[in-house]
């Protein structure tokens, strides 16, 4: 059976709309909301390291871009999407492999 080629939006949807990728994006969103609430509600004038958590949950992809300026803020969503895409591809690989019933190591007697 010949595989049909997908467009870029179809490819993104195929790999990003599954429980593992959506769960990861939910965790990233929750951490970013926590960082925003913590940053704006902090009563002390001391600098907080809460913003580092947003970079850590999207590492290693977000760490490839510099932290300074607006590029640092763009690194978080880019890192989250790249990581979710990778997790989605892994999820699709495992579930499709299991669905096809590959018998690795099965020896006919």
Image (cartoon, rainbow, N blue to C red):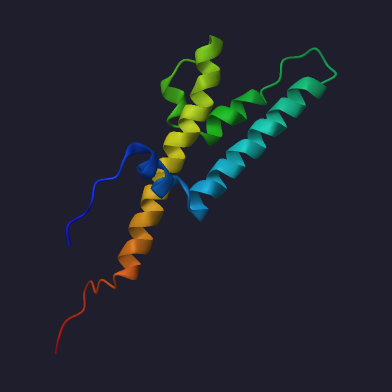
Give the side of residue 74 with respect to residue 51, left or right: left
Residue depicted at x 59% and y 29%: 54
Question: Where residue 87 sits in the image (x, y, percent)?
Answer: 42, 47
Q: Is residue 27 visible?
A: yes
Residue depicted at x 71% and y 33%: 34
Question: Where residue 18 sits in the image (x, y, percent)?
Answer: 48, 53
67 vs 96, nearest the viewer: 96
Residue depicted at x 40% and y 55%: 91
Q: Is residue 67 visible?
A: no
Quarter in which the C terminus is drawn: bottom left
- Tell which residue pokes out farthest to the top in this image: 69
Give the side of residue 89 with respect to residue 39, left or right: left
Question: On the image, which quarter does residue 51 sit in?
Answer: top right
- Tell which residue pokes out farthest to the bottom in this image: 109
Residue depicted at x 43% and y 45%: 13
Residue 92 vertical position relative to residue 102 in the rendered view, above or below: above
- Tell which residue pokes out farthest to the left in this image: 109
């Amino acid at each position: 059976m010949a595989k049909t080629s997908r467009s870029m939006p179809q490819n993104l949807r195929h790999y990003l709309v599954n429980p593992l990728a959506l769960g990861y994006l939910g965790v990233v969103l929750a951490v970013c909301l926590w960082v925003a609430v913590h940053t704006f509600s902090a009563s002390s004038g001391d600098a907080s390291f809460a913003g580092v958590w947003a970079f850590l949950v999207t590492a290693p992809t977000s760490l490839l871009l510099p932290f300074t300026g607006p590029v640092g803020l763009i690194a978080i969503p880019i890192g989250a999407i790249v990581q979710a895409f990778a997790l989605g591809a892994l999820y699709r690989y495992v579930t499709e492999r299991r669905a096809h019933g590959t018998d690795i190591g099965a020896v006919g007697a």
